[in-house]
Image: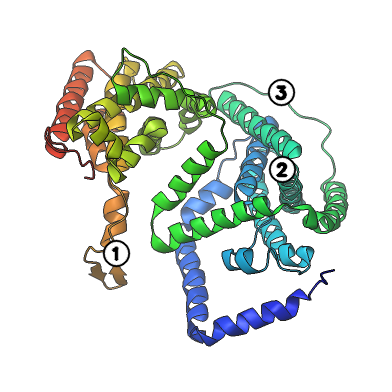
Amino acid sequence: MTSVVALRPVRRWIRKAQASHRDRGDALATVYTVIFSIAVLSVMAQDTLRAVFSPLVPHLSGVGAAATAACSAGLIHLALRRLGPVSVTRPAAYFLLTAPVSRPRLLAPSLFAAALGAAVAGGAAAFGILGNTAATGSILLVATGALAGVLLALLASAAQSRPRLASLTDTVARIALAVGLAGLVAEAIGWTPPALGGEAAASVLVTAIGAVTIVAFFLAVRDLARTPNDAILESAKTAGTLADSVYGIEPSFLSGMLERRYWASRRLRSTRLPRRLPPLTGQDLLLARRRPARLLWTAASTALPLLLISVPRWVLVIALLTGMVIAAKATTATIKTDAGNPVLLRMLGLTSRQVVQQRLWLPAVLGGVWATVALGLLQAAGALPPGQWWALGPALGAIGGTAAIRAARAGFVRNDLIPIDTPMGSVPTGPIVYAFAGLDLLILALPTVIRLLQGAPATWSAIAVQTGVAVLGIRAYVSWTTDPDRVGLAK
């Protein structure tokens, strides 16, 4: 019979072995850099943070505060579920997960870290809601938000070892997020919500939630041993890939992992491609049909710009451009695969120009539909100057689809480029070039952006000009970055 080995001496030996091969100043330098960066960014963004957490004119009603709390709770829970939350480091996953050590002691630090992070997020959300609510409230509600965050972390930990509970809680979190966003949008466009009555005393609420949190925490720690190894390994891979993406400034690591994990968890059947469409366009359409949840969230997100009616116009413009590019990116993972490994293209005998032309159809349609509906809703709400702004949707969507295609063709971050020397230190050039890949094509939307910023009406001549600029720009991009005799797509 295998006896359980004490975990603390094992970890102490591992830390000593690591310290013998590592400079002692590296860890202190990392901690100093992180703290100093957070402090500098906080000082630089203090006006923005003050406007977000404590505006001069609070505008949220009781229903709006409840909707914001529902959105915050849904987002925190879904984020915790994506990260684990019970996890270990990758070295510990290799050497300690299957070793005869106490599993609660091995997994408890990750649960403590997740609970702490959720408490900070919940407290910040409660503080922001309290600052934006027209009615007065007690500062003890911030402690309530922090305790609610801890409860969400414990619920996510319990769901990690119970598939049925995980499915139920994820569904409830998505519903809470959707209902909360719907309430905020309705209030933003002029709906007068009913007044909420019967508010509970903050001290009683904090006491009750605190007692429940303490009991749930002890139960969660005792329940850690039930967490299966495959769930812990998945969360360890997620955390490790996220750390690699941040340290190596390579976002494609994380996006590629999420894409592979999604398709690995689906049961697929062979299906014939549509015969009336080009083969690659048909493949994109088939992949889009196999992700109905993403299409539903994309359709629902067309109402989110309504939340920005009262903000400066340039914020609304950025939200519109960002939304149509994100909507167009629903199927661009295929061209990213083609750019990295063009085996399928060689088998089909397709050139790079044919590939880009066929892959461009569906992103342009998705971006066009999103932009048309979003502009139509803003126009119906009276948030835009006079004119038929919805008619600009197809042209803007085609630009967003082209920008998404260009971003997908960018490949990996080039760390071989010469860095830029500044008085603050050297700035790597590769991540900057990668970040602007695709965004540079949004300059084709400049005629519409100028009219939005100036408050000019959307006349049919302006719509024709924007459509012409979009057609000429997209045609120039396809002609200059592809070749009728070449297969390679990386550009």
Indicate which disc, 1 or 2, sits on the residue closer to the N terminus: 2
Mark number, residue 428 = 1
Residue 400 percent location from the top left of the image? 31, 31
Amino acid carrying label 3: it is Pro
Q: Which residue is mark 3?
A: 194
Judge by depth and name the residue closer to the eye, 450 or 176.
Answer: 176
Is there any visible trace of residue 384 in the rendered image?
Answer: no
SS of the residue under disc 3: loop
Question: Badge 2, how many Cα within 10 Å: few under 14, some, many 20+?
Answer: few
Are discs 3 and 2 less than 8 Å apart at CB?
no
Q: Which is closer to the viewer, label 1 or label 2? A: 1
Quarter of the image for the N terminus: give it.
bottom right
Amino acid carrying label 2: it is Thr
Indicate which disc, 3 or 1, sits on the residue closer to the N terminus: 3
Amino acid carrying label 1: it is Pro
Q: Residue 361 sits in which quadrant?
A: top left
Q: CA distance from mark 3 to mark 1?
A: 53 Å
Residue 297 percent location from the top left of the image? 52, 28
Quarter of the image for the C terminus: give it.
top left
SS of the residue under disc 2: loop
Q: CA distance from mark 3 to mark 2?
A: 17 Å
SS of the residue under disc 1: loop
Vertical arrangement, residue 93 with respect to residue 212, above or below: below
Q: CA distance from mark 1 to mark 2?
A: 47 Å
Please name the residue shown 50% across and 83% down the image: 22
Indicate which disc, 3 or 2, sits on the residue closer to the N terminus: 2
Are discs 3 and 1 less than 8 Å apart at CB?
no
Please name the residue shown 83% across and 72% down the image: 3
Residue 119 percent location from the top left of the image? 69, 55
Question: Badge 3, how many Cα within 10 Å: few under 14, some, many 20+?
Answer: few
Colour scheme employed for the rendering of this structure: rainbow
